[in-house]
Image (tube, helix red, strand yellow):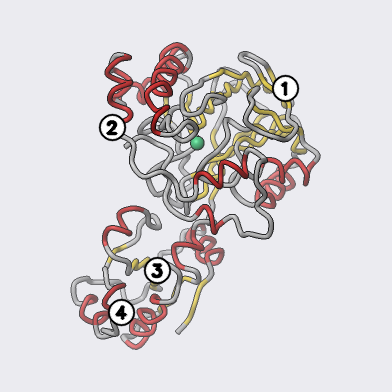
């Protein structure tokens, strides 16, 4: 039986290799979160109950290309070894994914977003495929800004090196609740300046941004737009008026949830603030502006297509944007699902009130994105 690491699998999928991803977890876990393009044949419980014959039985339900490698995926990479063994004996070139969907949380890809007005500038969307977090690298004239870094620092430094950028700014759209921010670590590694909106939450030094403050990166101007709601210090960043980084205020498919900072009791007030931010700030930008969000709730493909959309399309698509303020404030608290795993501890770390210590951030972060309303 062969095993494959998260990194090897990621590289092979990015290179366009055709691989059958066979997720053997039960259906509810699969529908919660899975690797893009996976096939679900639930057999996790049966295998753990000793029914190893289930693999052959389940394989009769599908027709797989016998020439394609098959990667069995489970929670942690143990049960999938049994499945990969059985698949191997059936003649497949089978692998078990080391660390399962848990370790896959670290997998990432990049997508290039073209900017028409800023000709000497480049924008990369760095996506944490295993979790749905989206971060950004803007380069212009040899300088770069990184927004909401959510994967290992080395990912950003190696992209900057490849592109000939010096990372001079690191920006945060808000205090994150679903992943350990890599912003301070990235600043330490590069000497970049950390900026976020003026707030009384964090206990570390940062450059405090106020509404309409500007930051220059090469020839690009990044302008802050204060958008309280998801959290009270949330801010969107307009890039030369052509791209709007909306953090967790507005996504491509839905909007951010307002209960992760102030809890369930604060959800109504948060929803009212979010309504005002959406209608008085975000929707006031030009219809043609490209919205680049901080998350997606859908699994991210390996085709390099950015998760982004025009403001016009998004505002027509998301029905909640057409409700009035009172209905919005009433509806939002009813649309809140489970909160992100370990969110209180993650927030404390991101506020500088607790230390990650030697803990692998993955221990706190693994799991699907839950920053959006349902
Ligand atoms: Fe968030």
Residue labelled with disc 4: 47
Label annotation for residue 73: 3
Of residues 368 and 354, the one nearer the viewer is 354
- Residue at 71% across / 41% down in the picture? 184
Disc 3 on helix, strand or loop?
Answer: strand
Disc 2 on helix, strand or loop?
Answer: helix
Instruction: Find the distance from the CA under tag 4 to the CA under tag 1.
Output: 56 Å
Disc 4 on helix, strand or loop?
Answer: helix
Instruction: Find the distance from the CA under tag 2 to the CA under tag 4.
Output: 38 Å
Give the mark, 4 or 1, whose residue is nearer the N terminus. Answer: 4
Give the mark, 3 or 2, whose residue is nearer the N terminus. Answer: 3
Q: Nearer the viewer, mark 2 or mark 4?
A: 2
Q: Position of residue 85 (x, y in %)?
A: 38, 84
- Residue at 69% across / 52% down in the picture? 154
Instruction: Find the distance from the CA under tag 4 to the CA under tag 3.
Output: 13 Å
Which of the image's four quarters has the N terminus? bottom left
Q: Position of residue 87 (x, y in %)?
A: 34, 81
């Amino acid at each position: 039986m062969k095993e494959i690491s998260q990194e090897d699998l990621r590289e092979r999928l990015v290179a366009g290799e055709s691989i059958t991803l066979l997720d053997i977890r039960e259906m509810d876990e699969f529908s919660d979160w899975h690797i893009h393009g996976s096939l679900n044949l639930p057999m996790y419980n049966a295998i753990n109950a000793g029914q190893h014959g289930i693999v052959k039985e389940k394989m009769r339900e599908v027709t797989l290309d016998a020439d394609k490698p098959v990667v069995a995926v489970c929670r942690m990479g143990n049960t999938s070894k049994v499945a990969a063994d059985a698949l191997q004996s059936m003649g497949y070139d089978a692998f078990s994914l080391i660390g399962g969907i848990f370790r896959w949380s670290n997998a990432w890809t990049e997508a290039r977003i073209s900017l028409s007005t800023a000709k000497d500038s480049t924008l990369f969307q760095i996506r944490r495929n295993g979790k749905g977090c989206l971060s950004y690298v803007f380069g212009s004239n040899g300088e770069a800004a990184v927004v909401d870094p959510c994967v290992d620092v080395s990912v950003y430094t190696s992209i900057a090196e490849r592109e000939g950028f010096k990372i001079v700014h690191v920006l945060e759209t808000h205090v994150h609740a679903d992943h350990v921010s890599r912003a301070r670590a990235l600043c330490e590694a590069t000497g970049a300046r950390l900026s976020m909106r003026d707030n009384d939450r964090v206990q570390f030094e940062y450059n405090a941004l106020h509404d309409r403050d500007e930051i220059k990166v090469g020839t690009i101007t990044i302008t802050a737009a204060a958008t309280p709601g998801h959290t009270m210090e949330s801010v969107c960043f307009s890039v030369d008026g052509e791209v709007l980084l909306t953090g967790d205020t507005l996504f491509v498919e839905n909007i951010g949830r307002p209960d992760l900072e102030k809890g369930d009791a604060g959800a109504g007030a948060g929803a009212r603030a979010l309504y005002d931010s959406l209608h008085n700030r975000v929707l006031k930008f030009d219809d043609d502006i490209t919205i680049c969000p901080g998350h997606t709730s859908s699994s991210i493909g390996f085709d390099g297509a950015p998760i982004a959309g025009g403001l016009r399309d998004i505002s027509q698509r998301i029905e909640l944007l057409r409700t009035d303020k009172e209905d919005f404030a009433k509806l939002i608290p009813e649309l809140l699902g489970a909160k992100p795993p370990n969110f209180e501890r993650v927030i404390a770390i991101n506020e500088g009130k607790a230390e990650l210590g030697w803990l692998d951030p993955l221990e706190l972060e693994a799991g699907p994105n839950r920053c959006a309303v349902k």
